[in-house]
Image (cartoon, rainbow, N blue to C red):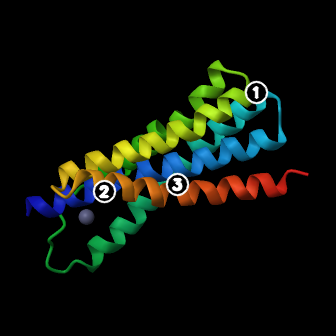
Amino acid sequence: MKIALDEDYFRSVMFGLQDGLVSTTGLVVGISAGVSDRAIIILAAFVAISVEASSMAAGEYSSEKAVHQLDKRHRHRDDLIIGAILMFFSYLIAGLIPVLPFLFFPVDIARMISVPAALISLFGIGYLKGKIVKDKALRSAAEMFIIGGLATAIGLIVGVLLKV
Ligand SMILES: [Zn+2]
């Protein structure tokens, strides 16, 4: 069934994009609250994105495999490897967005660009998602903005609280 195939790939991409944005923004802003060396922030961010994208891809493979094994009526036709690859690149690409400002600007300015860039991206992804699933695009955008924004805010608050 074609629909089931599209659904699983779609979920991988949406999950990867949202998670890549939210967790990397929390990470870089959190680290930059305690570390002023730009090279260390960038290094830590790239290590974290690579590890996390790989881990998410592995998780996607294993969890989707479990779902397929449960699927006795064989409604899932999606390829486990393709799902994992989609997850990897979605996470990687979205994760780079909050890191990019640190490549070009001093830490203080980069942090102030990074957070809005991530929030605008969440809004944009939500909007596209709404268009694709033929739901109200603006409402979908606002929802993604709020959910992702809340998760990002928790990361930022922890980062600020831990800054001694
Ligand atoms: Zn599947």
Q: Position of residue 24 (x, y in %)?
A: 59, 45
Amino acid type of the residue tagged 1 in the rendering: Arg
Residue labelled with disc 3: 149
Residue found at x 83% / y 37%: 35
Residue, disc 1: 38
Crowd band around label 1 with a 10 angstrom C-alpha radius: few (<14), some (14–19), many (20+): some
Distance between the alpha carbons at the discs numbered 3 and 2: 14 Å
Question: Which amino acid does the dot numbered 3 rest on?
Answer: Gly
Q: Is residue 109 visible?
A: yes
Whether residue 88 is visible to the viewer of this picture, yes or no, is: no
Q: Residue at x 19, y 50 (%)?
A: 132
Residue 108 is drawn in which quadrant?
Answer: top right
Q: Residue at x 52, y 54 (%)?
A: 149
The answer for how far apart the CA atoms under marks 1 and 2 are is 35 Å
Q: Are marks 3 and 2 in contact (CB under 8 Å)?
A: no
* Ligand 1 is within 8 Å of the C-beta of the residue at disc 1: no
- Graded by Cα atoms within 10 Å as few (under 14), some (14 to 19) or many (20 or more), the crowding at tag 2 reads many
Amino acid at circle 2:
Ser
Label 3 packing within 10 angstroms: few (<14), some (14-19), many (20+): many
Please name the residue shown 16% across and 64% down the image.
Answer: 4
Give 161 or 57, whichever is nearer the viewer: 161
- For this orientation, the residue located farthest to the top is 104
Percent across and percent down for residue 57 are 44, 52
